[in-house]
Image (spheres, helix red, strand yellow):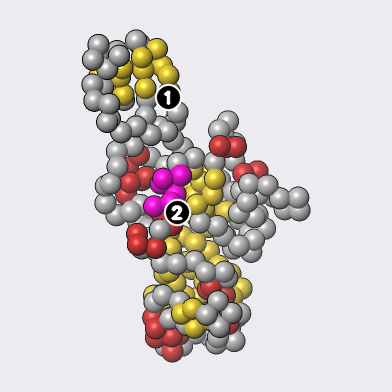
């Protein structure tokens, strides 16, 4: 079939048996579509009180907020706690989501944190040096903290341990009373999205989140 030019992959006649295809490659044989799966990438502004899960018996989930016919195909990339708000990504492209979560990619997540007590300069060095947590027997990777106001700070992490931000501020006996994620990598939360609203990412945003182009996205 290849020798007879009967197979097309993404609109190009395939003649090499080693042609790489994936879940989202459009494959045609004799003009008939054999595979034409679409990749979906969603940005959601998650409100407080919604769980980052596909199903939950007690709380509204992020999927409950979506109104797309394909929403049940999606999985969550980077969860947020029940009492946190902001940017959540969902996709059906597992290779993309895996790249976002790989430690070697060093995709930073940025948060606006509101505290119960005043901040001071010692927080900056403590976050930058990392903190040891005996329960997991690990030291957190360096995190960047920028003081915004006496009671608010921006925190940038390249990892996401369990309740990490709350526990790090807990070392100062300073309770987190508000946690809002406003960016992942080079992708900021769309300011036009109200809490609970979502939209699809553009092809440019899908690649730009890493800060460089790695893969062509076919819409």
Q: Image quarter for residue 157?
A: bottom left
At x 65%, y 54%, the residue is: 50
- In this rendered view, identify the residue nearer to me: 117 or 214: 214
Foreground label between 1 and 2: 1
Q: Indicate the quadrant containing the C terminus: top left, top right, bottom left or bottom right.
A: top left
Q: Which mark is residue 149?
A: none
Residue tagged 2: 189
What is the crowding at mark 1: few (fewer than 14 residues within 10 Å), some, or many (at least 20)?
Answer: few
Residue tagged 1: 36
- Residue 73 x, y percent position in the rendering: 56, 37
Visible in this render: residue 124?
A: no
For the magenta stretch, what is the residue range? 94-99
The secondary structure that most of the magenta stretch takes on is helix
- Residue 109 x, y percent position in the rendering: 43, 63
Visible in this render: residue 68?
A: yes
Can you say whether 110 is above or below 215 in the image? below
- Magenta-span inclusion, residue 4: no
- In this rendered view, identify the residue nearer to me: 46 or 77: 77
The answer to whether 92 appears left or right of 2 in the picture is right
**Separation of residues labelled 1 and 2 (CA atoms):** 30 Å
- Residue 106 x, y percent position in the rendering: 36, 63
Q: Indicate the quadrant containing the N terminus: top left, top right, bottom left or bottom right.
A: top left
SS assignment at label 2: loop
């Amino acid at each position: 079939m290849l020798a007879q030019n009967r197979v097309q992959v993404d609109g190009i006649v395939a003649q090499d048996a080693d042609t790489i295809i994936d879940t989202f490659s459009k494959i045609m044989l004799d003009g008939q579509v054999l595979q034409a799966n679409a990749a979906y990438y969603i940005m959601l502004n998650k409100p407080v009180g919604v769980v980052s899960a596909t199903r939950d018996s007690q709380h509204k989930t992020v999927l409950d907020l979506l109104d797309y016919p394909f929403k049940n195909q999606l999985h969550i990339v980077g969860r947020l706690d029940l009492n946190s708000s902001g940017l959540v990504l969902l996709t059906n492209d597992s290779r993309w989501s895996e790249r976002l979560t790989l430690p070697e990619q060093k995709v930073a997540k940025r948060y606006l944190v509101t505290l119960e007590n005043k901040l001071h300069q010692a927080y900056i060095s403590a976050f930058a040096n990392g903190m040891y947590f005996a329960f997991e027997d690990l030291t957190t990777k360096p995190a960047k903290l920028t003081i915004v106001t006496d009671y608010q700070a921006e925190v940038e992490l390249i990892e996401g341990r369990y309740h990490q931000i709350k526990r790090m501020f807990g070392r100062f006996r300073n309770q987190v009373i508000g946690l809002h994620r406003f960016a992942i990598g080079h992708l900021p939360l769309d300011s036009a999205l109200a809490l609970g609203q979502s939209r699809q990412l553009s092809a440019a945003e899908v690649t730009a989140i890493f800060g460089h182009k790695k893969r062509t996205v076919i819409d």
